[in-house]
Image: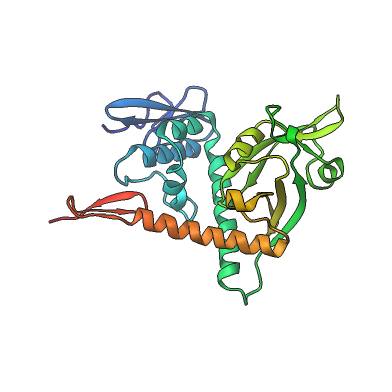
Amino acid sequence: MEEPRSSDHSGPSKYKGVVAQPNGHWGAQIYSNQQRIWLGTFKSEMEAALAYDSAAIKLRDRPTPRNVHCTDATLHEPSFQAQFSTETILSMIKDGSYAAKFSEYLTAQAYYNSTKASHDHRHRAPSGKLSQLFQKELTPSDVSKLNRLVIPKKQALRHFPRIPDVELNFFDRLMRSWKLRYCYWKSSQSFVFTRGWNRFAKDKGLRAKDRVIFSSYERDGLKLFIIDVAYCDEGTRGGEVISSLEELEMKMGADEREETKKNELETMGIDQEKKVIRLFGFQIQIDQ
C-alpha cells in the first residue's frame, strides 16, 4: 500500500510516509501487512523522514527507496537492527531513543575496528589509547541479591562523573553494550552501580573473589568505558586471569577475531535443496 504524503492543509511533504501536523510538527507513518503503523510526531520534516526510513528497513522484506540517501553511517542500520525484534525497533523510533542507540552502536563498531586493526597491523602506531582504570575484587555482597556493586571511593571520584545519579554505558570484549546506573548513596556514603549490574553479573557467571576490570578507550576526543572480567578459578570456568594491560589488549583482539570468524562461518551456510544462500543474515534466492 502506498504511503500518503500529507493529510492536512499545511501542504504535502516531499518525503514518503511523512504528514504535516496542524501544530507545525511532522508525523511519520508506515504501512505493513495492510496495517497503518504510527511512528510518532517529530519537530522537523527530516526527522520524520528518517524515522520512516529506519522503520522500512525492519518492516520491508526487500530494500526499498529511502527518503534520504544512504550514508556511511546508515549503511550499518540493517546490522544494528538485526540485534532487536521488530517491536523493539518500532518502540525505539516512537520514544525517540533510536538515534542515540544507533549512535552507540556506531561508536562500538568504530572501537572494534580500531582495536582489530591495531592487532592485525602490530607495526603500525595505534590510533587509540586503551588504559586500565582499576580492578575490583568482588565480595559476597557484590554478587548477592542486593543487586549492587560498591566502587571504592578513591576510584569512583577519580574515574567516574561526579553526579549523584547517572546511567553509564560500558562495552565488553564482544562489544556488547551494558548500561549501569551509577549513584551515590548518602546513607552509607557509598558509590555504587545498581540497575543493570545484576544482569551483567549473571551473564558473566560472576562469583565472590572474581575481578571486574574497568578500562577506558580514547580516540579523537571520544571516550568509551570498557568492562571485562577475570575469574579466580579460571581452570573450572574456562576463563583466564588477565594480569596486565598488554595481556588485556591482546586477549580482546583475539576474542574479537574469533567471534568475527565464528559469525562468518555460521552465516555463510548454503541450503542445497532450496538453492538459497544465507549471507550475513539475509536469504538470497538463486534463480534456476
Pick the residue in front: 185 or 217.
Answer: 185
- Residue name at image x 38 percent, y 32 percent: 12
- Residue name at image x 61 percent, y 53 percent: 235
The quarter holding residue 113 reads bottom right
Residue 37 located left or right of residue 126: left
Residue extending farthest to the bottom is 123
Q: Position of residue 226 (x, y in %)?
A: 67, 50
Colour scheme shown: rainbow
- Residue name at image x 45 percent, y 35 percent: 89
Q: Quadrant of the N terminus?
A: top left
Q: Quadrant of the C terminus?
A: bottom left
Classify 279 as above or below 207: below
The quarter holding residue 6 reads top left
- Residue name at image x 63 percent, y 64 percent: 250
Residue extending farthest to the front is 236
Q: Position of residue 199 (x, y in %)?
A: 60, 35
Q: Position of residue 158 (x, y in %)?
A: 84, 47
Classify 134 as above or below 1: below
Pick the residue in front: 226 or 27.
Answer: 226
Q: How many marks?
A: 0
Residue 158 located left or right of residue 148: right
Q: Position of residue 114 (x, y in %)?
A: 59, 62
